[in-house]
Image (cartoon, rainbow, N blue to C red):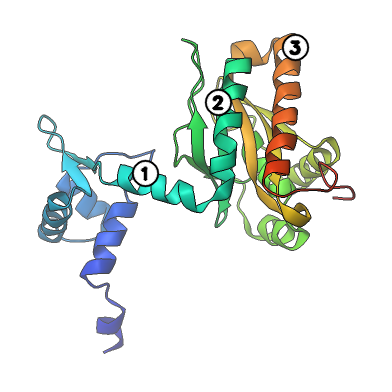
Amino acid sequence: MTEQKDRPNAIEKALELLLAFQSQRAAWGVRELAAHLGFSPATVQRLLKSLKAYHFVEQDPETRQYRLGHVYFRFLEVLQAQYPVTREAAPIMRRLSYDTGETVHLNVIDGRERVCIDSVESPQALKAGMPIGNRSPLYAGASSKCLLAFCPDTFVESYLAEEDLKALTPNTPGTVAALRQELAAIRKKGYAESLAERTPGLGSLSVPVLGHGGNLLGALSLAIPELRYRDPAHKARCLELLQSAGVELSRRVGHTGPYPPAGV
């Protein structure tokens, strides 16, 4: 009886199926997806047929593989409207991208990961992309480390005690001691920086977005191709403009204290 009770129902199977579509694997064939999920191909085919009817998935006519459907764009505006920080951030992000020529992205913590909730792409031919929905662990990359650094101490200690720091590139922080030292430096400076910690050829700068009482709401970041990131004058200008944008956005969403908060 227990085994039967623990078996996922049709709705749970459909949710597991949808969660299999990630930026690292955006398209699936039926048999590949069935093997990945541990479901029968017939079950996966049936679920996909139902999801396709409501545009949650669509099928590429050439490859016959499935990908997420366009229905999610209907939810994007609703989700962003529920978070005041995205409304306030939008004009600031557009101006920051125009002034720096770089991609600007807004990030929050979701569980134990960083997730991008809004992005303004660089107008330049050589640019660093950051799609909405992109995820990464909290120990790699400027935006991730910025979020982690300004989290409450209880969360930080729990994360450091439990997270397995897997090297994404040779530049990824490799030990808890090294990461802890970086987090302390970020809190002291008020910003985070990284080069090729998640993706080779990509540099990043990030500042916290703070709300009422200094609580962390997110991280505002610039994604910069390594070629321009290594230009000291450009990097310094980007950091100055980013910090000003971080102060402005934090004030707009209710922060009245020091930025970054004293004693963090």
Label number found at residue 22? 1
Sequence-wise, which precedes: disc 1 or disc 3? Answer: 1
Q: Which residue is mark 3?
A: 232
Between 136 and 124, the one lying in front of the other is 124
Question: Mark on residue 94?
Answer: 2
Outermost bottom residue: 1
Q: Nearer the viewer, mark 2 or mark 1?
A: 2
Residue 116 position in % (x across, y down): 51, 40
For label 2, the SS is: helix
* Among the 4 quarters of the image, the one containing residue 8: bottom left
Amino acid type, label 1: Gln
Is residue 248 visible in the rendered image? The answer is: yes
Q: Earlier in the sequence, mark 2 or mark 1?
A: 1
C-beta proximity under 8 Å, tags 2 and 1: no
Separation (CA) of disc 1 from disc 3: 35 Å
- Determine the image quadrant of residue 85: top right
Asked if labels 2 and 3 touch by Cβ distance under 8 angstroms, the answer is no
Quarter of the figure with residue 88:
top right
Q: Secondary structure at mark 1?
A: loop
User: Can you see residue 167?
Assistant: no
Q: Secondary structure at mark 3?
A: helix
- Viewer-side residue, 106 vs 142: 106
Could you say where residue 190 lies in the image, as x and y percent from the top left?
Answer: 80, 37
Q: State the image coordinates of residue 209 (x, y, percent, origin top left).
A: 68, 43
Residue at 24 percent across and 67 percent down: it is 11
